[in-house]
Image (cartoon, rainbow, N blue to C red):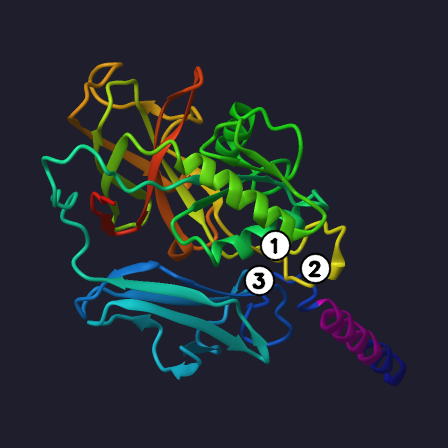
Amino acid sequence: MKKWNLFNILTALCCMVFVASCSGNSGDEDTPGTGGNVSGELVLTATKSFISADGQDATVFTVKKGNTDVTAEATIYKDNEVYSSTSFSTATAGDYVFFASYEGEISKKITIRATEGGTSGVPADPNPDQFDGFKQRVVAIQSTGLWCGNCPLMITAIEAYQKTDADAIFVAAHNGDVMANNYSNAVNSFMGITAYPSLTMNMNSAYTVGAYGDPDLTVQEITAVMGDCMQKGAQANIAAAVSLSDDESTLTVQAKVKVAETAQYRIAAWVLEDNVYNDEQENYYPELGNDFTNHSNVLRLSSSEKAYGDQLGQSSTLPQGSVNDYSCTLNLSNASISSLSNCRVVIIVTAPDGGKFAINNAVVCPIDGTVAFEYE
């Protein structure tokens, strides 16, 4: 009897050990974020990047570590000070920078832009009877790629040149990397680009600059070619308004274009993004000493599948002294945008030049903003 009891006791203990060793090992009962190690990148997101500066419109924050929501345990900062809420609204227009921390890790910063009243349409023309003396801007298209070890030479030269010319518009059309897309490929193909890096003014291959071994020499060449382009003048003048939908899924672009010369004109709206992080840039010139992990002027989206845009106006040829309306809707789901608050819209107008369409003039319009006709 004692033997049998001892056997049963030992058997019961073994069963208990077996049950204990199996319990919890399937992972089905684990609750992420409530203990243990949580892996992955720490990311702060917001439901909206743009809000109205009315004190009521709000954006809501979420902090995730990998796929785990750690908002309740994380600390959110606004302009480097602890922010005690997971939503944000303001009555003051401006840009507000936020980031989060969790268990010693810091997230990347995001920007929330508060705007006053949205857009009310294209601004009125200050000189409705004037059809000459249009303000001219050259669009410099940088054909580039992360795989291109010579491209940092051009990037360095562009950054130096921009300090001397605030009017020039730079666009980065990527090739063969994660920032390339159908739109950038169409632009590079239209210009006939075979050598990287290249900088082409107004999509006209006659005005193309390569990268010299010395960025200072490249700046000198950019300056000279820019001057040649400016000699042509502008026959188109552009006013525009860009509005963002409440759910931030689409951009609506409205524009008016005045033309000073009878010709065919095409138009397109391009979405550009700044400060796109990527640390894979090839660099054959480490002595440059620059940080090539943040990429600006990245072409993300276009209103047209054609590099030179779609027909402007009701007829293929527009008469001198006419004012023409344009509108389009851009679906942001078609673009790999990292941060909408780092984006802006460039509206280009093209016209025939040397038997091929080239950019005649362009303007930059902020999201939920406007730009009026400008004259010299």
Element under disc 2: helix
Dividing the picture into quadrants, the one containing residue 42 is bottom right
Which residue is denoted by mark 1 in the rendering?
156
Residue 100: say if magenta. no
Image point (21%, 64%), residue name: 57
Circles 1, 2 touching at the beta carbon (< 8 Å)? yes
Numbered range of the magenta stretch: 9-22
Image point (66%, 56%), residue name: 279
* Quadrant occupied by the C terminus: top left
Which residue is denoted by mark 2 in the rendering?
288
Element under disc 1: helix
Mark 1 surroundings within 10 Å by alpha-carbon count, few (fewer than 14), some (14 through 19), many (20 or more):
many
Spatial CA span between label 1 and label 3? 35 Å
Q: Is residue 222 above or below residue 68?
A: above
Spatial CA span between label 2 and label 3? 35 Å
The numbered dot on residue 66 is 3
In the visual, does 237 lie left or right of 233?
Answer: left
Ranked by sequence position, the earlier of labels 1 and 2 is 1
Q: Residue 326: horizontal and vertical position, in percent?
A: 22, 30
In the visual, does 42 lie left or right of 211?
Answer: left
| 283, 249: nearer the viewer | 283
